[in-house]
Amino acid sequence: MLRRTARRRGPLIYRHTVAVRVMHWINVGCLLVLLLSGFQIFNARPDLYWGQASDFDAPLLSMGAHRAADGSVVGTTTVLGHRFDTTGVLGASRSASGEMEARGFPHWLTIPGPRWLAMGRTWHFFFAWLFVVNGMCFIAYSLWTRHLQRDLVPTRTDWRGIGRSIVDHLRLRHPTGEAARRYNVLQRLAYLVVLLAFGPGIVLMGLAMSPTMDSVLGWLLHIVGGRQSARTLHFLLAFALVAFVAIHVFEVIVTGVWNNLRSMITGYYRLPVAREDSRDES
Amino acid sequence: MNRRRFLKGSILSAATLPLAGCADRLSRTDWAVNLLGYAERLSEVVQRAIAGDALAREYTEADISPVFRPNGSTDPSDPDYRALAANGFRDYRLRVGGAVEHPMTLSLEDIRGLPDRTQITRHDCVEGWSVIGKWRGARLGALLDRIGPRPNARYVVFHCADRLYGEDNYYESIAIADAYHPQTLLAYELNDESLPIANGAPVRLRCERQLGYKMAKYIMRIELVESLEGIQGGRGGFWEDRGYQWYAGI
């Protein structure tokens, strides 16, 4: 079966325009730098709160370090009152020179590596601008070329097949042949949520942390409950994007890593051959 | 216990270390830091255009934080300052000069006699936390009207009594437009009491709409200048000299 499917090859189709490919990879770089420089900024105060101001006695999340009875440094993460030992990764971790130090995220997850808030902010804001401009270009381009309306918004047929699509995804069965020419319904929904909710949401929550912008974004602070709530939501949305990227990369791998990578680099995607034949033979 | 965690950590760090290492090296080059720094100018221009003279949000008495967390210096050790504090700041004199028509020296009483404003505002630290407090102080704009800034005056510089980490004297600077903002105060009261030493007695700056490090405490001298060059590190503030952004509206 494997041999036969390998011999039969589907047609090569032009899937991603050069504009989409360029904006995709700019976005990859932005998200990576924003996440790691964001951890650096978070480390300056590795706590999250809710409301207008910080209730220092009741953080929602808190990373910290203390010395155990045997003198060793223990890193802890407390979430909604539940404390976890996260030594080595969160709360306390080894610095580049090997000593245990108290810090939220470890040096290998921050930009720059050492504790350096000012430089973390410099990286974060530069790439935040790039992320915003790139994202707005992508939305404008997708509307203009109808990529968004045609390829991302689910059709009525898509909606009817959503249950089937969920089961197929869980069984790691993916569309082949002609059906693979278009994005499936879960793919469409995932891209739409990221493009229209997570992306704009994380930018707005970032802006809601700016004291100057807050003088004109009172309505936004009112909706989310305050600046500290916005900071917490900014952090949660970052992890929502991390979760999206994890699933996205997983799907890229299970549906053919080289074919998918080629399509996002050269634009050309080889349609996977229809599954029906191989299923009969197996 | 930790073999699995160690392995996981090693795999993750193998993925991020090349990038982080590259970012570390770039963080120590002038060209990359200057390039990244253009974003600060862009943020300032865009934010000033959008926000204009809008007022920072003001809160109610019920929102006031139980403790107004002090940060940076909380008890300056300078002998002259200690002597002033020991005497309840009765001998305190604020000197105002530089590019102005009428240099002045003001006692605390003189400052309390200037047009004042009371406001309950949120204080945002660059580290990420916020506290809410009630401030009363002299409007800096009213003081500037009396001293008459010369046309070339672009910045208001605040020289302070404290030495942070035993290093340089704290200082800060704001744009003259921010100095005239109605909520910009030389604050002498916090939560209906004389400003405590931990929070900057006898007088500190309130420049709402910017981060906490801009709001200099223990102000001894105010100087109007055309350029920030030649003042300490030349970047306009204690933290700015250590790499922080001069525009702290974000």
Image (cartoon, helix red, strand yellow):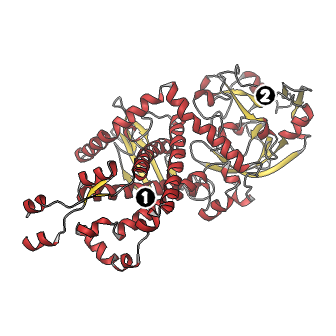
Q: Callout 1, which amino acid?
A: Ala
User: Which residue does the numbered mark 2 point to in the structure image?
Assistant: B220
In this rendering, does residue A59 appear at all? no
As drawn, the residue found furthest toward the bottom would be A160
The local secondary structure at tag 1 comes to: helix
Q: Where is residue A45 in the image (x, y as percent from the top left)?
A: 52, 44
Neighbours of disc 2 within 10 Å: few (<14), some (14-19), many (20+): many
Q: Residue sitting at 58 percent across and 54 percent down?
A: A228
Q: Where is residue B121 in the image (x, y as percent from the top left)?
A: 72, 51
User: Which residue does the numbered mark 1 point to in the structure image?
Assistant: A240
Q: Residue sitting at 50 percent across and 43 percent down?
A: A127
Taking depth in this image into account, of B65 and A220 the one nearest to the observer is A220
In the visual, does B197 lie left or right of A270? right
Decide: is A214 above or below B164: below
In the visual, does A68 lie left or right of A176? right
Decide: is B105 above or below B141: above
Taking depth in this image into account, of A104 and A261 the one nearest to the observer is A261
Q: Where is residue A94 in the image (x, y as percent from the top left)?
A: 35, 36
